[in-house]
Image (spheres, rainbow, N blue to C red):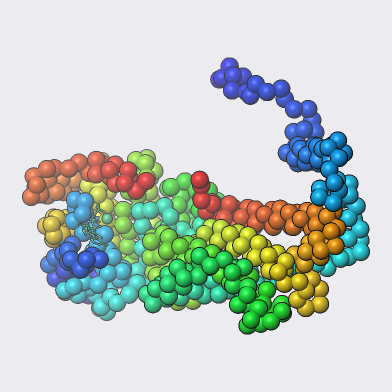
Amino acid sequence: MTPVVIVDNVQITYVDAGGRRFVAVDGVSFDVREGEKFVIIGPSGCGKTTLLRAIAGFVAPSRGTVLVGNVPVREPGPDRAVVFQDFDQLFPWRTVLDNVVYALAVTGRARGRAAVERARDFLRLVGIEAAADKYPHQLSGGMKQRAAIARALAIEPKILLMDEPFGALDAITRTQLQHELNRIWRETGVTIILVTHSIQEAAYLGHRVLVMSTNPGRVQAIVRTDHVEDMDGEAFAEATRRLRHLLGGEAEGQPVPAAEITRKEVGEAQ
Amino acid sequence: MRGELELARPRAVPAPGVLRSPWVRRALILAALIAAWQVYVTVAQVKPLLFPSPTAVGEALVRDLTSLSIPRSTVTTLQFLVIGTLVGAALGLLLAAFSITSPIGHELLSILTSIFNPLPGVAILPLAMIWFGLTPTAIIFVVAYATVWPIAISTDMGFRTVSPTLQMVARTLGLKGFRLVADVLLPAALPHLLSGLKVAWAFGWRTVVAAELVFGVAGAQGGLGWYINTARYFLETPRVFAGLVIISLLGIAVEYAFRLVEFRTIERWGMKKTG
Ligand SMILES: Nc1ncnc2c1ncn2[C@@H]1O[C@H](COP(=O)(O)OP(=O)(O)OP(=O)(O)O)[C@@H](O)[C@H]1O
Ligand SMILES: [Mg+2]
């Protein structure tokens, strides 16, 4: 069976206003299979978001190809739903339910009563049906992320792209949502590409983890973590150790604890 | 806990029952101001021709309200104002939409606003009179002119400051062109749009009154500016004041209407800009 996503020898270059070119990622190749939970991890600035944007269709590679469902990515589309780290990804002028209903209607997935039914199903799936009639500003950060996941899943994308979706959450909510995401994946079987800074998150959630090195961003290793069942067993400990060593062996030689990077990111986002 | 609460309580003597309502307090302050005015006029023996007493102004108000001359003039002025503002808003939105969807539109808007924004609406009035004569069209033209720039500028600013995340979400949902503008950019820009409308309304209001002062009657019935100017001509100072009172009251009403709209929309959605 051919993979859903094929990233083949991709280079992505940003050109700034002065015309200077900056190669963010180079020579990156990997593929993602249907129904897989694929995690991308790496130090800050290594190009994780950039890669995800290329799959989503927001940036075009300057070399190489990105195929989704065997078709080159040209522009963003509802077959690749994205969940972002920021809490402002819901439409503030629509209730939680309307956010999902609108996404269904505008993508032609469902209309009218059917759309409302379906939206409620997905709100139930992520556990916020009680907040259906609230406006986004009335929700906690964790609830906003749940709503965003519901909206992304409701339009039945081929792939769910997630860019540090739990990065701005407190540790307790974060752990809770990691478990929930695993459950949601079991119930829907959706293909997930998840970008994270957290070694624990990668080891726990991922089937495979792509470890990136920086300057420019390249593939350092792809680690299998699909045997990790929970966060307590030896498999989890072994996987996190492995990932930590890979990330610690960076050119700068500075092993950066994942938790610390995460905290820095949260500070920046505020 | 309890002790802290006691300490935090304001020192002022608690107001008795009715005074708690801000509306009652405001009405009382207003009454006091009017009373002071009345006392000043009677004690200082000012010439009524220069500075009439509030009672004289009140009488003129009642007389012209019942004779329908004030209501007619008000309707005329509001008509010019609303039509002009609607035309200005429509053009402003179009310009802003063009500006956000194409680089040429962006340049066009920035050139147009730098040329015309410093030119006040009244300054265009002579030109409007040459083009359209002494017709309602001339007044509507200057009002539209006065309102289009603040609306275009603030809407464009609103469009440009829409969160990049929200824009990416919109593009993921496949939104483009008109749909993108109407469904995402416009509501997201609503706080800016509303403050632009407020500025536009204030500009339009000044412009329409000034234009009527210069203009006299355009069409069947003169507006409030004309009403005031006619009263001045016949030295009926209380009626001049009556006209000013009406203009002030309308301004307050419009302000209130804006607050209501804000409360129902951007405040309810948590989008109101703080500070
Ligand atoms: N729009 C842009 N224009 C120019 N350079 C950019 C742009 N976006 C990102 N970059 C650069 O590309 C590199 C990769 O950025 P990217 O955001 O993909 O990193 P990241 O791995 O997601 O980092 P983080 O973990 O901090 O989110 C960085 O050096 C960044 O400065
Ligand atoms: Mg990133």
User: In the displayed structure, would residue A93 be above or below residue B136?
Assistant: above
Please tell me which residue is depicted at 12% across the width and 45% down the height of the picture.
A248
Q: Depth check: A12 or A172 in front?
A: A12
Does residue B35 appear left or right of residue A44 in this picture? right
Does residue A196 appear left or right of residue A121 in this picture? left
Please tell me which residue is depicted at 42% across the width and 72% down the height of the picture.
B111
Percent x, y of residue B238: 85, 53
The part of the image, by quadrant, that contains residue A158 is: bottom left
Percent x, y of residue A96: 52, 57
Q: Depth check: B56 or A237 in front?
A: B56
Numbered marks: total: 0
Please tell me which residue is depicted at 75% across the width and 64% down the height of the picture.
B225
Whether residue B124 is visible here, answered yes or no, is yes
Which image quadrant: the N terminus of chain B?
A: top right
Does residue B99 appear left or right of residue B120 in this picture? left
User: In the displayed structure, would residue B269 be above or below residue B145?
Assistant: above
User: In the displayed structure, would residue B10 be above or below residue A77?
Assistant: above
Percent x, y of residue A35: 30, 65
Please tell me which residue is depicted at 46% across the width and 58% down the height of the picture.
A90
Whether residue A30 is visible here, answered yes or no, is no
Image region (quadrant) for ligand 1: bottom left
Percent x, y of residue A268: 31, 46
The part of the image, by quadrant, that contains residue B163 is: bottom left
